[in-house]
Structure formats: C-alpha cells, structure tokens
Image (spheres, rainbow, N blue to C red):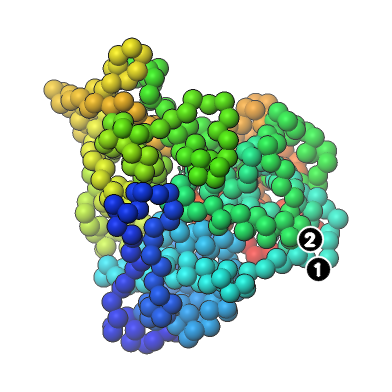
Amino acid sequence: MGKITGFLELDRLDRDYRPVAERLKHFKEFVEPLPPKEVQKQASRCMDCGIPYCHNGCPVNNQIPDWNDLVYKGDWQRASKNLHSTNNFPEVTGRICPAPCEASCTLNIDDKPVTIKTIECAIADKAWEEGWIVPEPPETKTGKKVAIVGSGPAGLAAAQQLARAGHDVHVYEKNAFPGGLLRYGIPDFKMEKIVIERRVKQMEAEGVTFHCNMAVGSKVKLADLEAKYHAVLLAGGAERPRDLTVSGRDLGGIHFAMNFLPQQNKRVAGEKLGKVLELTAKDRHVVVIGGGDTGSDCIGTSFRQGAASVTQLEIMPAPPEHENKELTWPHWPLKMRTSSSQAEGAMRDFAVTTKRFEGRDGRVTKLICARVDERFKEIPGSDFEIAADLVLLAMGFVAPVTDSLFPPDQIALDARGNVKANEVDYATSRPKVYTAGDMRRGQSLVVWAIREGRQAAHAIDKALMGRSDLPR
Ligand SMILES: Cc1cc2nc3c(=O)[nH]c(=O)nc-3n(C[C@H](O)[C@H](O)[C@H](O)COP(=O)(O)OP(=O)(O)OC[C@H]3O[C@@H](n4cnc5c(N)ncnc54)[C@H](O)[C@@H]3O)c2cc1C
Ligand code: SF4
C-alpha cells in the first residue's frame, strides 16, 4: 500500500478551476492539474482497504489501490500499464466521469475520499506526455472481420479490444468524425477533442478502419454488414430525446439540447454546420429544462456564447446538502451537487413543472410554470412565469433510434425500447449481431459505455474464436 499513515497526515486536495470570469472567455478546458508531487501525496492517502469498495464503485473495475501505490512510489509507467489494463480511455474518464469510485472510497465515510479521478487523469496525461501510449497492434491476425455501428465510447472501446485480439475491425459512423457524444455532446471546456483524435490515431495504427459519414440504415444497410462481416456490434447510443409536449412547444426558440450543443462543438472544431438552423444563446434569456449533465453543458455553453441570463429548472425536489452515510455508503448518494457550469452563474429552481410556453410572433417569450409536490403533482395556485427567448430541453433520452437501423420486429427490444441483450454475451435476438453501451442499457455514463464495449468485445471474440484472452 501507499503510506500507512498517509490518510492521517494529509488532507484531501483536489484540482481547482480557473476563475469564472477568465474561463467564460473561451471553450478550452479550465481544470488546473495538480503538480505531480502533490498527486503522489494524494495517492499516498489510499488505505489499500482489505475490501476495496472503489473497485466495485468503478464500472470498469479499475484497480485503484494498485495504481495509487505505484504513483506514490513514483512508478508512473507501471501505474499507466495497470490503469490501461482495465480502462481503454482513462484520460477521458479522468476528465468527465462523475467518479462513483470516490463515493465508495472508505475515506468518503468521513467526506474526504482519495482524489481517485484526479490521480487517474494525471497518470493518463503523463503517459501521453512521456510517449508511453503507443499503438499495440496484434502479433497475428485471425482473419475474422467485425463491423461496429457507432463510434462513441462503447464502439471505440470494443473496436480497440477487438483489433488488439487480431480481428479486422471496421467502425461505421454517421457523423463526420468519430467519438459519439465525446465529440458532439460533451463541450470542449469539459474535454478538448485532441483527447479523442490521438486515440483515433492510435486505433488506426492498431488496424481499426473508420468509415465516417456512413449512416447504417441509409448509406449502408445492416444486411450488407451482416453479409460482409463475421459479427456486427450495434453501439449507436440512445439518441431519442425526451420531449415536453405542452402547449406552445412548436414556438420558435425551443430546442432539444442535442440540437444546440453539437453546433458549438463543431464551431470550435472548425467543422461545417451544414443546413441547420443556427442556434446561439448570445444576449438571450436562456431557460434550460432538466438538471443533469446535458443541462449543465447547455448552461456552460450558453454563458460562453454570451447569454443574458441562464435559469435551470428541475422537476425533482432539491436533494439534501449532505447524504446520510449510514444509509448510502458505499453507493452513489443522492445529494446536492453543483457542476462547474452551474457555478458559473446559473439560477436553479427545483420541484418545478412547465405547464405551457407562450410567445409573440411565433417565438417563445415565457414559460408558465408551477410548483410540484414529491409526487410531481402540481400545487394549486403556485403558477409563476419565467421570461425566456431560448429554451433548451435537456430532460434525458428515452431510447435508441432503431427504426432507421433495422425494421421493427427484426431485432428484439426491451420494455424501454433499448436493443435487448444480456451483459454476458451481449448478443441480440439476431444471429451475429451484438449490442453495447447506451443502445443496450439506455442513457448512461461514458464509463459504463467503456465497460460494455470491453465486455461485448470479449463476448464477440469468444463467439468467433471459441475462447478469448480479452479481459471482461
Ligand atoms: C450532452 C451530454 C453530456 C454528457 N456528459 C457526460 C459526462 O460528463 N460524463 C459521463 O460519464 N457521461 C456523460 N454523458 C453520457 C455519455 O456521453 C453517454 O452515456 C455515452 O457517450 C454513451 O456511449 P455510447 O458509445 O453508447 O453512445 P454515443 O456516445 O451516443 O455514441 C453513439 C454513436 O453512434 C452513432 N450512430 C448512431 N446511429 C448510427 C447509425 N445508424 N449509423 C452509424 N452511426 C450511428 C452516433 O452518431 C454516435 O456517434 C453525456 C451525455 C450527453 C448527451
Ligand atoms: S473510471 Fe470513473 S469510477 Fe472508475 S476510477 Fe475513474 S473516475 Fe473513478
């Protein structure tokens, strides 16, 4: 383990942010890395618990105490090797994972968990800086061909694993560049896109071929892929947004978050927007409906575009400031969290429902809202108005978009409309066709998508070869 008395001697210290006034001027990352010596100190706080709950808290089961110990001892290269044995993209999770591992850290009983995510990011960033992350092409090829539909974290993780196992992997992506929500959903200020680009380069050198601007279902049919490949993995995400079908919804100025966010990411990347209604929050009074990650990304993007004000509405009641550890630890607790974007000046309101939108000359001018009780029932007489000229709907995603991919009834869906498959073989109801990530589990997190991509790769490798050395 690290330093036996480390957690007694040292306090938790985490990365800080650049000041709000400064970071709102650009779309670059604004998290200040800790100096390497401080990261080593923080790693020494790990107690190497007999039962490391963080292993289970982390969906990819990162071997956290092992790499904490290696970092404490200054062996960053072995730490990187260990970290990469469970996580294909730790520089991604080190930036944008909500870190359920830290919630389950034993030191979190005292509210001072090891800064696991920061240490993970430091290991991965150092590994890139030092040139330790290089292509790992397979020594022998299997002669098997696998197609992957979708290049989000699930598709990318599966592609890397399968290519390293010696298969000929082809990724089909409907967008112009790979990355899925890592590229087009998550703003650059949370993760700059160089992070994806260098991984894509690594994967190309490992033998993965990317076919972008290739929507499966229109430009190429699923049946064509089935004919050409030994296995097909569907990793198309969960792209159907939850709508708010109240009166006035058709007014101008009301948009889904995922019509708004990708435009800014494309602007930053210098990518053409194409034939779309160009959206901007500049000088607008913005209301974001929905309190999750997507809502926060809309807030941060709106402020950087020069919004006059940003208000975020959440239908759930305000959670408690502090969780009851005895009831929640080592699980992910429901508690009040303030994202870096919310901290940039958003007004937040809870237990609010939007009854209708009103407008003038075809454009939204206000929301008519009401307060709700714990059962989401409207409290009579609680109506109030909020002025708005841009409303962003960020209420989550209900299901994957499958109708363009395959005809109904050809592949079984579960009760929620996700593509049906279990977490052992990831096989759909159709022979040779597998599924992973948000397309299978519904809207989730990047770290779960990486886990599913890795596990699906193991399942496909085993089905093709009779056995697999890929870790699950
Ligand atoms: C705005 C936003 C912010 C988020 N922030 C965070 C965060 O901070 N941390 C976190 O952990 N999670 C976050 N999430 C959730 C996370 O991004 C997803 O859970 C994760 O990306 C899912 O990975 P995936 O590979 O399953 O799908 P996706 O990332 O959605 O990728 C699916 C890919 O498939 C492609 N595709 C779909 N259909 C086809 C087709 N027919 N043919 C070809 N290609 C197709 C899509 O274009 C896309 O590139 C966020 C989500 C959103 C929307
Ligand atoms: S991937 Fe997420 S849960 Fe796992 S160690 Fe990293 S920050 Fe923690």
* Foreground residue among 119 and 431: 119
Q: Which residue type carries mark 2?
A: Gly
Q: Residue at x 41, y 68 (%)?
A: 33
Q: Secondary structure at mark 2?
A: loop
Q: Amino acid at mark 1?
A: Glu
**Label of residue 166 in the image:** 2
Q: In this rendering, is residue 109 above or below 338?
A: below
Q: Where in the figure is residue 160, as x and y percent of width and height?
A: 68, 58
Which image quarter: residue 363?
Answer: top left
Q: Is residue 308 placed above or below 56 in the rendered structure?
A: above
State whether residue 240 is above or below residue 122: above
Say which of 426 and 80 sits in front.
80
**Label whose residue precedes the other's in the sequence (1 or 2):** 1
Q: Residue at x 49, y 25 (%)?
A: 277
Answer whether labels 1 and 2 touch (C-beta < 8 Å). yes
The crowd level at tag 1 (other Cα within 10 Å; few <14, some 14-19, many 20+) is few
Q: Is residue 366 above or below residue 42?
A: above
Q: Nearer the viewer, residue 170 or 415?
A: 170
> In the rendering, at what x and y percent does residue 125 appear?
52, 68
Q: In 3D space, how far apart are the residues under numbered discs 1 and 2 (Cα atoms)?
A: 7 Å
Q: Position of residue 124 (x, y in %)?
A: 53, 68
**Residue marked by disc 1:** 139
- Residue 29 appears at what percent x and percent y? 43, 56
Q: Quadrant of the C terminus?
A: bottom right
Horizontal side of residue 230 vs 69, given as left or right: right
Q: Which of the 4 quarters of the picture holds residue 396?
A: top left
As drawn, the residue found furthest toward the top would be 361
